[in-house]
Amino acid sequence: MVLKANRLRKLALAPVLMLLSLASAGVLAAGGKVNQVNMSPGATEIGQSIFDLHMLIFWICVIIGALVFGVMFYSIYYHRKSRGVTPSTFHESTKVEIAWTVVPFLILIGMAVPATSTLLEIYDFDDAEMDIMVTGFQWRWKYEYLNEEGENVVFFSSLRTPQSEIRNAEAKGEHYLLEVDEPMVIPVDTKVRFLVTANDVIHSWWVPELAVKKDAIPGFINETWTRVSTEGIYRGQCAELCGKDHGFMPIVVNVVSKEDYAEWLDEKQAQAAQVSELMAQTFTLDELMERGETVYDRNCLACHGANGEGGVGTPIAGSPIATGDIDAHLEIGINGVPGTAMQAFGSQINNVEMAAVITYQRNAFGNNMGDMVQPIDVYNHKQGQGEN
Amino acid sequence: MGDHHHGPAKGLSRWLFTTNHKDIGTMYLWFSFAMFILGGSFAMIIRAELFQPGMQLVDPAFFNQMTTLHGLVMVFGAIMPSFVGLANWMIPMMIGAPDMALPRMNNWSFWILPPAFLILASTLFMEGGAPAFGWTFYAPLSTTYAPPSVTYFIFSIHVLGLSSIMGSINIIATVMNMRAPGMTYMKMPMFVWTWLITAFLLVAVMPVLAGAVTMMLMDIHFGTSFFSAAGGGDPVLFQHIFWFFGHPEVYIIILPAFGVVSQIIPAFSRKPLFGYDSMVYATAAIAFLSFVVWAHHMYTVGMPVAGELFFMYATMLIAVPTGVKVFNWVSTMWRGAMTFETPMLFAIGFLVLFTIGGFTGLMLSIAPADFQYHDSYFVVAHFHYVMVAGAVFSMSAAVYYWLPKWCGRMYNETMGKTHFWISFIGFNIAFFPQHFVGLAGMPRRIPDYALQFADFNMLSSIGAFIYGASQILFLYNVVATIVAGKPTSEEKTWDGAEGLEWTVATPAPYHTFETPPQVK
Ligand code: HEM
Ligand SMILES: [Cu+2]
Ligand SMILES: [Cu+2]
């Protein structure tokens, strides 16, 4: 209630705020601030050049606008019939008309020059110190560190904000909708190249403060890069309509010192090694169910429902597949159903997770099949079709 | 009905079978207003959901259906048909022609519209819901990943494309062949000129849109892979084709609005339009340039840098002829003797807000800066300044300006001015803050947003509700005028108005200029 009254009070001030903010747009500091009104120069040199360009054009427009509207309002005030003026009849002037064609043209050239040089800078992909493959999925991002020292570091990054906050059952956290389970981590002062693509539909990878926005297009690999000069956490969102949960696939980039980055990388690699050990293990039904629930909630719930009741996807509770042939079930989990929203999860979750989630689907929601899938079964299934 | 100079038929058949340009114009205008209300109610749902952070009213899937249908209905159902209606009513009267050149086709081009939109609206009730891929329907979201209703969407796009093409052929034929003796091209009113050029644009790009949706249809049902990367196709190809239609489309929307404003500003300034010739050339230049700038909507798809530069320079160039237009309008007002009746207020509102939209357009044309603006609310603000404050304001101006001529009754001036001021204020409260949230990083087409955008979004929603409500006043004013407005039989409603339409009786008789006037 207090919050609301506060907001209403702010709203009453809004028109004043709007004018003030316009006037002060030029001197605003960086950062995704509450009620921020202007672009942020962000934390990169390119971001600063883009910001400068933006302000240059903004001020040019303000000046031209002031002139045009000034003349117009002067005229509206002084040249009104109620003041008893007689209208003049002039209706052309070649000189003036040439002037206001040529002068704007020259101003445009003045804008085009810095715009071109900034653009060329942005398009300079050379000398990148590391590469990260960014892949858009409905509706999360996959980050794959491509250089040797980043080998085996591959993970998905999905929205962490719980449904309860989105559905207004709980108070919203500070980074509502802009928080992920696992952020991308990159080192500071390093030219990082992103190779951007998508798995299903078109997405767009946008982090305003890194001055990067690039469409992620299936079948294409786009290049872009950044070099961040200040450590910190930078947040962005998918910028291209990509279906139902387009608004719910944020991006978080954690920019850390080079030492911290190396440490993080080691840790990730140790984790990867651990997973490959797990692959060879045999689990009990309970263990698989426990892991499976987590995997299901993260990957399948959005379409198949919290209780397996279905939604975008078919119901799992009582599904003929989930209560039928186990191989057919696994096949759908790995390869999806082509031409539908049911994607091939074989390349998105690891074998342990796949084994767990299939087992979970067969034994939860009243399905009680009692059978299970082991990681080795998933491995064999994939081998059987010549995939790894 | 032996009498040749008969009046309108009675009952429903008058409207079903009419070939009279005024009847057809009237139907177009009412139809577009109905679509405006429909598209507007979708917008109200969108703004209500965005009133506060969190999902309150609709789910994300339905939200996407709303943004998609809102865009489609407003562009193809409200704005375009409204100007075709205006063209039907006014072009014959402005060039001294008895009717449109192809009256039966005229009847068709209108009557296929309502079924097309009925089909489009019915997708809301289909399994899987209505199209939810945005009015720009990028593949593969609109093909492989589309709901089944996409097929109906494709069909309705085909039908409305057909309607637009027939309408434009008719306008071209009328303007080229039916001008009264002495009405040379360079004497035509600006509204006729802008429509002539618009009609050429339409004939050129509607088939391209038809091609795009046909390729979608093939991909969805006949196993082709035009836009599917998995089959060797190219999703970016879709965007090139769409925007080759889409950018000229935005000028199709705005050029007739330019025409309207070029009629109204001189009338209330009591002074001839400044720089008529340069207005004509500027319109032609804009139309020509509009074919070579489409990829400014695609700066982030990963074009080669040479492509980016070409499209950036070409787009910036459009600002020159657009600027010429604005300067000409202001010079027309300069040293006139102005009065500010409702049509003039809307025309000035247009001038101010369209210019702001033009400025943001110029900002968007700068490719490196567009990397930050693109697909953010900044773009949403830009195109509402040009489309709503541009096209819709000019349409309101046109209705107030010609309504007395159409129905022989005067609208209520106070109510008209109130409508203007509420619209103007509501519009700015709704859309100005969208510049801010866009620059601060809020993407467009999202049903829910981060907390830092909350205040401006609430403000924006309040403004949208105000703007929406003001249209009810508009409807009331127009209906009240037609039913019970103060009768007027003055030929010239406005003392400064020029043109052949003001030489016929008021209300305009069912048939006008059966013998062509002489234009000196
Ligand atoms: C000075 C003239 C103009 C320039 C330079 C200009 C430039 C641009 C640019 C570069 C974009 C792409 C922005 C982005 O997506 O990142 C854009 C978007 C748009 N413009 Fe303009 N524009 C101008 C006038 C107009 C007019 C007159 C209209 C229509 C009446 C219009 C309607 C639109 C629409 C609808 C979009 C968004 C399309 C979408 O993505 O849904 N613009 N404009
Ligand atoms: Cu998205
Ligand atoms: Cu455009």
Image (cartoon, helix red, strand yellow):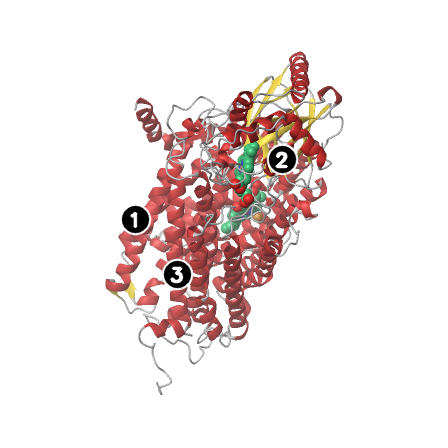
Total label count? 3
Label number found at residue A334: 2
Q: Which of A81/B15 is in front?
A: B15
Rounded to the nearest angstrom, the CA distance separating label 3 from label 1 is 24 Å
Crowding at dot 3, Cα within 10 Å, few <14 / some 14-19 / many 20+, comes out as many
Q: Is mark 3 within 8 Å of ligand 1?
A: no
Rounded to the nearest angstrom, the CA distance separating label 1 from label 2 is 63 Å
Label 2 residue SS: helix
Tell me the quarter of the picture where residue A3 sits: top left
Residue B71 relative to residue B337: left or right? right
Check contact, mark 1 vs mark 2: CB within 8 A: no
Residue A356 drawn above or below residue B384: above
Question: Mark 3 or mark 1: which comes first in sequence?
Answer: 3
| Residue kind at label 1, given as amino acid type | Thr
Q: Which of A286/B473 is in front?
A: A286
Residue at point 50% right, 42% down? B382
Residue at point 44% right, 71% down? B107
Check contact, mark 2 vs mark 3: CB within 8 A: no
Label number found at residue B31: 3
Q: Position of residue A342 (x, y in %)?
A: 57, 40
Disc 3 chain ID? B
Check contact, mark 3 vs mark 1: CB within 8 A: no
Callouts 3 and 1 on one subunit: yes
| Residue kind at label 3, given as amino acid type | Phe
Pointer 1: what residue? B418
* Residue B509 in sight: no
Q: Position of residue B432 (x, y in %)?
A: 43, 38
Q: Position of residue A225 (x, y in %)?
A: 67, 29
Q: Which of the two discs, 3 and 1, sits closer to the camera? A: 3
Residue B413 relative to residue B369: left or right? left
